[in-house]
Image (spheres, rainbow, N blue to C red):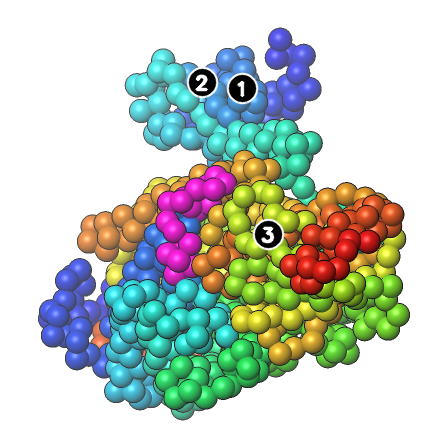
Amino acid sequence: MLEGHSLYPQLRQWSINLAVLSPQRGQSTARSVLATSTYRGLLATATFGFGVYPVAEAPRRALLPPPIYFFAVTAREVPRTPRLRREFAGTPVIVRAPLTFAGLVLAALLLSSCGTGGLSPIFPTPVSPNGQDIYNLYIGISVVAIIVFLGVEASILWVVLKYRRSRQPVGYVPPQIHGHNGLEIAWTLAPLVIVLVIVGFSFAELQRDFQPINNPDMTIVVSAHQFGWEYRYPMDGIVVHQEGTLARNVTPFVVPTNTLIKLQFDSTDVIHSWWVPAITGKTDAVPGYDNFSWMKIDQPGTWRGECAELCGAGHSTMQIIVQAMSQSDFDQWVQQQAAAQQPSASPSASPS
Amino acid sequence: MAATTVLPRPKAYDDTFFKPISLWLTTTDHKLIGIMYMVTGILSFVVGGIFALIIRLQLAQPNLSVVNAETYNQLISAHGVTMIFFFVTIFLTGIANYMVPVMIGARDMAFPRVNLLGFWLVPVSIILYYSGFFTGGALDAGWTGYAPLTEKAYQSHSLGVDFWALSIIVWAISGIMASTNFLTTIIALRAPGMKLTRLPLFVWAQISTSILLLVVGAPLAAAMILVEFDRQLGTQFFTTQGRPVLYQHLFWFFGHPEVYIMILPGFGMISEIIPVFARKPIFGYMSMVAALFGIVFLSMTVWAHHMFTVGMNTYVEGFFMLMTMLIAVPTGIKFFNWIATAWWGSIEFTIPMKFAFGFLATFLIGGITGVYLASVPVDTQLHQSYYVVAHLHYVLFGGSVFTIFAGIYYWFPKITGRMLNRKLGEWNFWTLFIGFNGTFLIMHTLGLEGMPRRIATYTNTEWATTNLIITISSFLIAFSVLLFLINVVRSWRHGEIAGDDPWQANTLEWATTSPPPPYNFERVPPVRSFMPLHDLRESGEMVDSRPEPARA
């Protein structure tokens, strides 16, 4: 079965080379070609995280060539001296590859939870143009970041695998290099160019979406307190109180779709921060400071958020629900609110 | 060298594990003070770690109530303060206190009694902070202690904030004393031949760290004094009616350079360790030094990147974004120089070298996520979320803690005369590496999905699995630290004898005995480059006491 495996010729050649090059490892040239059981053990190690070998044939970690090293990371705990190896020759030894195994488990976990929304490498799909722009910028930076990450990690891994002492010829003396001006200038300029490009795109986005709004369709004042939010609409007397709770259903903050809404933040006590990731980034509500944000939601729906600045014992209860509805539904909602609130304000007025 | 002459040493300095308490209390020897700093740091690490485990238990599943919200807020604050002020900074001060004079061939620090006072202010600071727990509750506004949440109006029930402010003032004074001492020592007490261009890079890192702490320690103390004025004298600096954002400016003018105070000495250690075990000189010595000072300068111009959501002018934000991103340049230089040092080397993967490469692999992630956070628009999404928690732990755990472990495994033989156990060290490294990445890698996704940091509990069941994996992994970290502690205590008493120079290293501290005598050197060897011991070995003036370097 193993004879047909793609690694087999390489393994076989390697074991023969090993026997010829280092007979002092306690093996004669004749019997050092690894038995089939050892290959099976190696394959099991790579697949399941561990494998069982007879001691006589169990390879020591240092003897494994780089291609195997990727898979079977720590094959060890094998008796080190020839005498002990002979003595325990028949004893099966477990050879482990915990890293491989952990990696497989982790990959499986990541893959299985990606679909369920448990893990996600990106934000929820944004529903407001400023959120969409931030999202695009995030993706743009990620392209560069992933290339840099893979490049540098690969070179670290290359150094680890290629230049370890056990892979170098006996008596190897490394070249005593003290530096290289060209290289040093290159890796000063390359990051400089990369970050300047990122700064440029980020600054353009900053100018596009973070400037004061002069002509909003509607301005809503978001006033934060310990522990809850108060949304004051421009329409007379309409206020939504979103009081802090750990229940999932807080009073929704209702807004019309396709309307440019300016949010004006303030706080009556400590600093809070209003954050609904699906709409846009967070904005701090600082007492005594004018701070603003805006949104223009393009579809009806409900989105969740939370206070993002530690504001006291009730911080985790300051939940946010934003509910967007079409203009006609919104008008209806406004009338309901007016009807509900007016009797207490002026009992004589009749609902419209 | 050691083989030829061994002078009798005072009884108090023999290699035993226990020394008389009177000696510890009164010593002005930089080495003993250094050990006390380091032990204080490690004890704080354990305490801060226990806080973290309770935090992780609370967050393991939605809607848990292992602790209530008030206690939770105290725990996260205590975790942050303990780890940042009482563990990383203190431990790094300790290892520098021990190593810097020996590495430059001096007998002691320039001001031994200032050193003594500076150290003993640290326990005072720590005791002050924890006293808060007995006065109705310690600080509960996060380690940053943002006003106005720390003001009397919202904290009338306890004195925790007052004790925190006093503790940090004492801590800042201690730090300023230590920095002055380091700078004076390095400028004035270098051995003959030890020019500035021949200083070990760890010493250069200590110079830059000390400059940073000197500059930013005072504004921190000022911020704390103003907080106390507000609370006790009724002033209105940072109150709801005052200017709360001013506090953030003052705090982060200290707070961001503090990040570099915690990582530059680590950079220095990595710059010592990689050349020794790759058997190559450091690549680009001068650009490494220049990069350190580039970081020192830039780190003082970036503080407002912690405040991109308070509503600053977009041009101000643009400036801080630019300066923040520019830090990637000197950091990149250091990174590439380290890799180039190991390239073509003959690398021996001892435990210090494993931790050094663990640092390279993980710190890179912290650096890259830092670029996302520096971009103002993206930061408005990621700020104050679990993405930031993951990022800062990649920088402080993957950065500082991995370098601290590398430094301990590297210098433990010099400090105690004994090797740390290699097998336990392997376990320590791999469990830490896996536990750390298991904890913090997937934490990024929680932030992207909208989980804010510092919430005492959460109701969103979609976050449950991720949080459970994080909690389990965090206990693997705890197990790893336990192995480390066992290793230290066991090896200090029963470890294999190390000899003067177990690693065949390059710098002066390995020329003296392990541990060094009170006067450090019987005779300071000649210094002709930044690798004096390497030169002596090459020219045959020094014969290695051990033919094979020990493996630990």
Q: Residue B71: within the magenta?
A: yes
The residue under label 2 is: A52
Residue at 48% over, 39% down: B61
Q: Amino acid at mark 2?
A: Val
Q: Amino acid at mark 1?
A: Ala
Label 1 neighbour load within 10 Å: few <14, some 14-19, many 20+: some
Residue extent of the magenta highlight: B56-74
Label 1 sits on a secondary structure element that is: helix
Query: Would you place residue B413 above or below residue B182 in this image?
Result: above
Label 2 neighbour load within 10 Å: few <14, some 14-19, many 20+: some
Residue at 37% over, 45% down: B66
Q: Amino acid at mark 3?
A: Gln
Residue B325 seen anywhere in this rendered image of the structure? no
Marked residue chain, label 2: A
Ranked by sequence position, the earlier of labels 3 and 1 is 1
In front: B531, or B127?
B127
Label 3 sits on a secondary structure element that is: strand
Residue contact between numbered discs 3 and 1, judged by CB atoms under 8 Å: no
Residue contact between numbered discs 1 and 2, judged by CB atoms under 8 Å: yes
Q: CA distance from mark 3 to mark 1?
A: 50 Å
x then y, percent, for residue A94: 41, 22
Query: Would you place residue B100 above or below residue A123 in this image?
Result: below
Q: CA distance from mark 1 to mark 2?
A: 8 Å
Residue at 67% over, 63% down: A345
x then y, percent, for residue B92: 40, 69
The residue under label 1 is: A44
Q: CA distance from mark 2 to mark 3?
A: 54 Å
Query: Would you place residue B446 above or below residue A34 in this image?
Result: below
The residue under label 3 is: A319
Could you tell whether B424 is left or right of A9 in the image? Answer: left
